[in-house]
Amino acid sequence: MSRQAVSRKDIAEAILARAEEVDTAELARQVAAYLLAEGRAKEIDLLARDIEQLAYQQTGTLEVRAESAHELTDTVASAVKALFTAKQIVLHQDVNPSLIGGVRVQAQDQVLDLSVRTRLRQLRNSA
Amino acid sequence: MYHYFATNDLEGIGALGIDPWAILAQGLTFLVLFYIVKKFALEKIVTKLQERHNKIDSGVRLGIKMEKEFEKLQRTIDQKLHEARLDADRVLDDANQESSQIIKAAEEKASHKVNQMLTDAEAKIESDMERAQQQLRKELVELVADATEVVLEEKLDRAKDMKLIERAISEVAK
């Protein structure tokens, strides 16, 4: 008897439902174990996006990731948040010196790449 | 008898040395001889002579006829030769014309081919130049990008980076 795979949307809903009750780290371990057991480890990024979208739909909270070569100042962080419209914006910052300069902003499935590295790559490709 | 006549005619015509009886005898002998020849030989001789004359005559006529035939033949030969020369000249002219046309066609073909080769060569040179320019442009851009990368990695500090980000965000927000 074959088991139907649980959809990512259902998994995301389950995670959000348990997020208030269970420790985040523990929840993450359980999700990882489940995905490994089901052989769906490759879907982790897609699942994360689904969770963000669902959270946004349910609570109006938008998760934004900002990657830059240097740590953002508060002013710049506010400017990045101002690019989006949501009830609540949670900004996650990552420092990546390989970007050289500028910032790469990602929210749900949208990406805004203003990094120097990308600009230089575009310049090289345009030749 | 001849001696008697001779000694008795010493006067008159005998003095001239002419013996009439000898003359008479010779005359008679001639007449007898003439009669004999006429009776037995003359006709045959005449016939033979006539035959010979006819033969000679017909030979001469034949000769004249042959000569005329020869002249006619010669004229025919000359005529044929002349016609043959004219034909040969015509054939030669045709051959010359044809060879001229062939040469001209070959020259035109060669010229066309040369022009085509020149056109192809020009197109290739242009294409090569364009490709070389593109390659040069590409290398120059890469060089500039590499240099910019190096300079920015060195010179772009946090403060300048934040200004860069603010400027980029304000551009996007417009």
Image (cartoon, coloured by chain):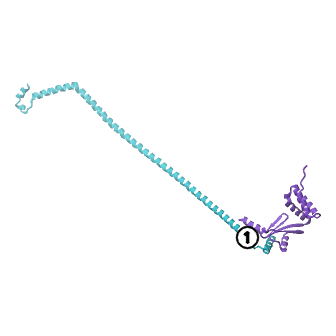
Expressed as whole percent of the image width and height from the top left, the position of residue A36 reads: 87, 57
Secondary structure at badge 1 equals helix
Q: Quadrant of residue B30?
A: top left
In this picture, residue B155 sits left or right of residue B34: right
In this picture, residue B156 sits left or right of residue B42: right
Q: Is residue B174 visible?
A: no
Among the chains pictured, the one given purple colouring is A
Q: Is residue A6 above or below residue B6?
A: below
Mark 1, residue position: B150
Question: Toward the viewer: B125 or B53?
Answer: B125
Count neighbours of disc 1 (C-alpha within 10 A) and say few if under 14, some if 14 to 19, many if 20 or more.
few
Question: Toward the viewer: B39 or B170?
Answer: B170
Q: Is residue B129 above or below residue B103?
A: below
Q: Residue at x 92, y 60 (%)?
A: A14
Quarter of the image that includes the N terminus of chain B: top left
Question: Toward the viewer: A4 or B90?
Answer: A4
Among the chains pictured, the one given cyan colouring is B
Q: Is residue A110 visible?
A: yes
Q: Residue at x 55, y 55 (%)?
A: B110
Label tally: 1
Q: Quadrant of residue A90?
A: bottom right
Q: Is residue B48 above or below residue A30?
A: above
* Chain bearing mark 1: B
Expressed as whole percent of the image width and height from the top left, the position of residue A4 reads: 90, 53
Expressed as whole percent of the image width and height from the top left, the position of residue B151 reads: 73, 72
Question: Toward the viewer: B69 or B120?
Answer: B120
Quarter of the image that includes the C terminus of chain B: bottom right
Q: Amino acid at mark 1?
A: Val
Residue furthest out toward the right = A21
